[in-house]
Amino acid sequence: MAPPHAAQARGRPIPARRLRVVVAGEGRAGKSSVINALLRQPVLPMLSRPGARPAFLLRHAPDEAGTVLLHHGTGATERAPALDAATDFGGAGLCEVLVDAPHLAGIELVELPFPSDGEVGPEALALMAGADLLIWVSIASQAWRLSERSVVARLPPMRERSVIVLSRGDKLRSAADWDRIEDRVQREAGPFFGAVAFVQAARDAIRASGEDLQAWETTGGHSLAHLLIERRGRLAPAPARPEPPPARRGMEELSAALAGLVCGGIAARRGGSCLAFGPEPGRAGPLTAALRTLLDGQEAVEAAAGAPVDDLSMRLGPHLLLVTRPAPSELAFLLIREDRTPLPLARAALQRIAATWAREG
């Protein structure tokens, strides 16, 4: 298999070249689960028909998310209609998957298949050795077997750009088991890897992590993604961002005091884009569209009451959604974690954000 190459995602500034993260390990070690935990979505099938699984390359491309491309050794490329355990890869050596994962912009993930006979060839070794970061996945309950060591020992020294990830951490019985296994792996695999991480990524947990930061932290995908993002920054720091306009700067400063903030936004009630802010601004756009529909439906209530509905709050699972109107034609909102942000503080911050926008926006 020749090393895959990926074009840059469209419409988003990213480093001059992508950080290549190669995810390797023995068969059934949990490589796909680790990648899905990083992505916060169950993209890769956990299992495939024996002998049919190619290498996978995943990259952020929001305009084409869901596209699956099969690259054959002949140079031909075709689209696959789906990606699941029954997908027929038709002998393709590389399956390229485009996803919407803005937190991994500027990063490409490559999952290497492990040969059924256990003989790792020179091309796979070259891909691992040439990675900007190597993630070696090992099952926690039987971590760092001699067969794994024999493969990694064939690589050049790359401790500073290698991480061993212990999968299926949820199968361990106690915290003492975690500590005992981590101590042993640190001791025995320390010469090969600069860090040890745990991932416990059952498919339901990965689905939950897409909407819930705490669930993502529980899978171990959050801390691993942070490591990748930090490494990407060292590879090619992003160009300095222009100074934000006063209105945005004021909103970000006000919202920074909200420990449980997920995202916030300012938008016109009808049409136009959303001025988003907060730790997860990508979630503000879909919320804006839904809020516009909801507020349109309130017009009958306002007409009957003879007055506008100025403020709105909704409990959405562990989140609270607070909405107000800086002006009749505009809406401002905050999505917060109810258990991390006092409601009075969030309401006060939203009113100040709305006032800042009305004054400077």
Image (cartoon, grey):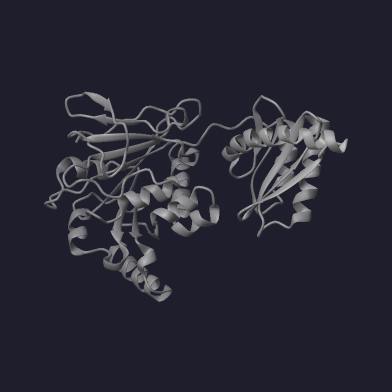
Residue found at the very far front of the displayed protein: 304
- Of residue 182 and residue 266, the one placed in the foreground of this image is 266
Q: Residue at x 19, y 33 (%)?
A: 90
The quarter of the image holding the N terminus is top left
Residue 216 lies, in percent from the top left, at: 49, 54
Count of marks placed on residues: 0
Residue found at the very far right of the displayed protein: 306
Corner quadrant of residue 187: bottom left
Residue 319 lies, in percent from the top left, at: 63, 52
Q: Residue at x 65, y 31 (%)?
A: 274
Q: Is residue 56 left or right of residue 198?
A: left
Residue 312 lies, in percent from the top left, at: 75, 44
Q: Residue at x 60, y 54 (%)?
A: 317
In the rendered image of this protein, does residue 28 appear above or below residue 333? below
The quarter of the image holding the C terminus is top right
Residue 58 lies, in percent from the top left, at: 36, 38
Q: Residue at x 51, y 29 (%)?
A: 13
Q: Is residue 90 left or right of residue 135?
A: left
Corner quadrant of residue 4: top left
Q: Is residue 199 left or right of residue 191?
A: right
Corner quadrant of residue 79: top left
Q: Is residue 325 left or right of residue 194?
A: right
